[in-house]
Image (cartoon, rainbow, N blue to C red):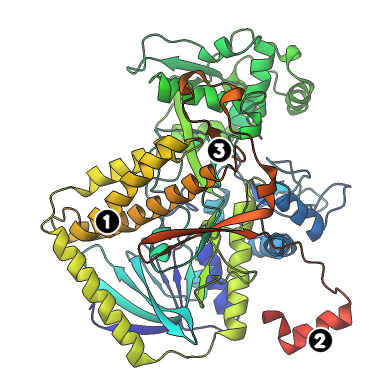
């Protein structure tokens, strides 16, 4: 019942690859009183998403080129706005995390001599990428779930955590539990020494999104508790199919399909619209090919590189209000493989991709990628594939230290995409590595420092009771509200895609922030229509999404007003420019001095506070064996 409270050492909120790994790592270290709370093991991004060959990024294990944690960390740091200590940890632990997955049964490819082969991914100067196919993260989840069940780690499904319980301890805030709701609207209180917060990215924020439809995220829950976030404006956007949400990266682009736009009915006025923006088919087809491993939209390539394609798709869909499709049945007009840029020619020749159509080339290079859409009811042999520029990943998230503990809420450990360890850009697949490394770090720190009980039971019960009362009062207001949850959710998502996606204009953002602030205050004071208890989860999810979209939009507006400029996956346009006729002169250029800074955002006392902090440098440290050994034996590494 809602008024009862369960006591645990650690609650893991979420069951994606990061959360599941944290549970396994905690159990291995003797932290037994743990519980995974999740909306469902089949929910979330990790188990429902992928790409043509979904990438896992780690230190290189094959080839003649040398690699090291420092070299890999420098790759993370190269685009800017990344803390050096976090980059080093993610690099140093990448092989440990990778081989844990191998031992759990994730079948990463290796050659007859046992070498784990690799390939280059976006923002990757080496061949650190690997994959088990389109569903790498799903295979990771399935392996971790098997291990959890073998270890008998308790899981409670159908629980949506909508409130973090916090207390003051020695002048600093700490978490002490959560409030969750089940599908029948029943509230459940849990007390915990530690919370591993593994709720994924802000999947429910955007109208045009490649996040799985079942995943909304819950970063707003932590924002409402006062957790500091960082780098929220640094998201990643790219081309994805919309009927079935999936990145059209890798081989989908390297097979060089034809881009078609139609009137809104999807049939009339079919045309190859990209041709009007290019001087010749050779450059156009080469750009299409490059989208394979330059998949994210990049401001630096928006007018003279492969990201022109994303920009032209955006103009076609959002400005001209047409629909855009990939046609794998025919080559682009004027396609001549001999006229492609040398990099494309070499790749296709090495792959033996000389077939007559894009679909035949796709099937030859990556049969699983071709089959994937058929498994989801889309036959690309007989129909075109509708696409759009979609939100795919937030490089920002909650701010944490190098043990993945929140910078301002003790005992709270954001892991996975909800942790904002990435900067302006990241190598493709590094998010999967970051989730595994973060889970390992959080588990190690909890086992070393936070495994003993410290909570004041009476105090926690009082905090939980107050949270329960406030929730019931909010839901009571909802029962008298008239505006529906779907209506407000559509409004919120439309606003985010209009103002907070990859094309940003100060005037549009300013208007959007005012609207978002009004929505948050109206929803908090009046609620939204709640017809029956079964809608409780959706209403409470909308509430945290509403706060999240306000904080994100305010952060993006602050970023634009600070004249950070166009960088990463965002193009900032001067106010008054004609969006339908974008030229490079309309774009606010990047101010590179901001690469050494990180934007921190915090919701406090009804306002969003913003500040710039300097990037922590890449640690040098004393690596003399006896010195490090002594610090390790004494437990000094955990300070």
The disc, 2 or 3, on the residue closer to the chain's N-terminal end is 3
The spot of residue 508 in percent (x, y) is 41, 36
Q: Quadrant of residue 192?
A: bottom left
Residue at (51, 77) in percent of width and height: 410
Q: Is residue 145 above or below residue 109?
A: below
The disc, 1 or 3, on the residue closer to the chain's N-terminal end is 1
Q: Is residue 291 above or below residue 25?
A: above
Q: Which residue is mark 2?
A: 630
Q: Nearer the viewer, residue 608 or 500?
A: 608
The spot of residue 335 in percent (x, y) is 65, 11
Mark 2 near mark 3, Cβ–Cβ under 8 Å?
A: no
Per the image, label 3 sits on a secondary structure element best described as loop
Residue 318 is at least partly visible in this image: yes
Residue at (72, 60) in percent of width and height: 84
**Looking at the image, is mark 2 or mark 1 nearer the viewer?**
1
Per the image, label 2 sits on a secondary structure element best described as helix
Q: Is residue 525 left or right of residue 168?
A: left
Position of the C terminus, as image quadrant, is bottom right
Q: Which residue is mark 3?
A: 570
Residue at (61, 62) in percent of width and height: 436
Residue 186 is at least partly visible in this image: no
Q: Nearer the viewer, residue 7 or 320?
A: 320
Q: Quadrant of residue 496?
A: top left
The answer for how far apart the CA atoms under marks 1 and 3 are is 28 Å
The answer for how far apart the CA atoms under marks 2 and 1 are is 54 Å
Which label was assigned to residue 521? Answer: 1
């Amino acid at each position: 019942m809602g008024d009862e409270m369960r006591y645990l050492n650690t609650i893991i909120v979420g069951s994606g690859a990061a959360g599941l790994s944290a549970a396994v790592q905690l159990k291995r270290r003797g932290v037994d009183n743990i519980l995974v709370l999740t909306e469902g093991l089949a929910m979330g991004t990790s188990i429902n998403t992928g790409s043509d060959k979904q990438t896992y990024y780690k230190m290189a294990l094959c080839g003649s080129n040398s690699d090291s944690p420092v070299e890999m960390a420098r790759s993370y740091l190269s685009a800017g706005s990344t803390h050096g200590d976090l980059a080093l940890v993610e690099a140093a632990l990448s092989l440990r995390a990778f081989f844990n997955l191998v031992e759990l049964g994730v079948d990463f490819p290796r050659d007859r001599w046992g070498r784990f082969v690799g390939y280059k991914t976006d923002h990757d100067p080496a061949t650190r990428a690997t994959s088990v196919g389109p569903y790498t993260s799903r295979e990771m989840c399935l392996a971790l779930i098997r291990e959890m069940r073998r270890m008998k780690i308790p899981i409670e499904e159908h629980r949506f955590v909508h409130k973090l319980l916090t207390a003051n301890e020695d002048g600093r805030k700490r978490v002490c539990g959560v409030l969750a709701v089940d599908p029948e609207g029943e509230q459940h209180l849990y007390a915990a020494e530690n919370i591993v917060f593994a709720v994924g990215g802000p999947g429910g924020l955007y109208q045009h999104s490649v996040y799985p439809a079942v995943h909304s995220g819950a970063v707003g829950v932590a924002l409402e508790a006062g957790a500091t976030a960082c780098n929220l404006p640094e998201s990643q956007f790219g081309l994805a199919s919309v009927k079935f949400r999936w990145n059209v990266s890798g081989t989908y682009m390297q097979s060089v399909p034809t881009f078609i736009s139609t009137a809104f009915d999807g049939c009339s006025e079919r045309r190859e619209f990209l041709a009007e923006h290019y001087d010749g088919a050779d450059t156009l087809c080469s750009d299409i090919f490059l989208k394979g491993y330059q998949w994210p939209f990049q401001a630096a390539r928006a007018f003279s590189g492969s990201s022109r394609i994303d920009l032209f798709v955006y103009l076609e869909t959002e400005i001209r209000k047409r629909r855009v499709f990939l046609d794998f049945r025919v080559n682009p007009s004027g396609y001549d493989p001999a006229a492609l840029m040398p990099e494309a020619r070499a790749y296709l020749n090495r792959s033996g991709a000389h077939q007559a159509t894009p679909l035949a080339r796709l099937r030859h290079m990556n049969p699983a990628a071709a089959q994937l859409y058929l498994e989801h009811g889309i036959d690309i042999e007989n129909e075109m594939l509708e696409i759009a520029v979609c939100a795919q990943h937030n490089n920002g998230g909650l701010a944490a230290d190098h043990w993945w503990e929140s910078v301002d809420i003790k005992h709270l450990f954001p892991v996975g995409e909800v942790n904002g360890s990435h900067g302006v850009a990241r190598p493709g697949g590094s998010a999967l590595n970051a989730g595994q490394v973060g889970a390992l770090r959080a588990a190690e720190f909890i086992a070393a420092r936070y495994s003993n009980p410290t909570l004041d039971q009476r105090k926690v019960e009082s905090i939980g009771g107050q949270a329960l009362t406030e929730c019931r009062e909010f839901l009571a207001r909802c029962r008298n509200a008239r505006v529906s949850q779907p209506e407000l959710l559509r409004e919120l998502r439309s606003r985010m895609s209009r103002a907070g996606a990859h094309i940003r204009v100060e005037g549009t953002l300013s208007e959007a922030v005012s609207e978002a602030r009004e929505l948050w205050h109206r929803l908090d004071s009046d609620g939204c229509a709640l017809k029956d208890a079964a809608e409780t989860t959706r209403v409470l999810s909308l509430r945290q999404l509403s706060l999240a979209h306000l904080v994100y939009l305010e952060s993006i507006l602050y970023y634009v007003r600070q004249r950070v400029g166009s960088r990463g996956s965002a193009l900032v346009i001067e106010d008054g420019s004609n969006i339908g006729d974008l030229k490079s002169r309309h774009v606010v250029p990047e101010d590179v001095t901001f690469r050494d800074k990180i934007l921190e955002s915090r919701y406090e006392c009804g306002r969003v506070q913003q500040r710039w902090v300097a990037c922590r440098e890449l640690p040098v440290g004393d690596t003399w064996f006896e010195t490090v050994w002594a610090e390790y034996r004494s437990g000094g590494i955990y300070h």
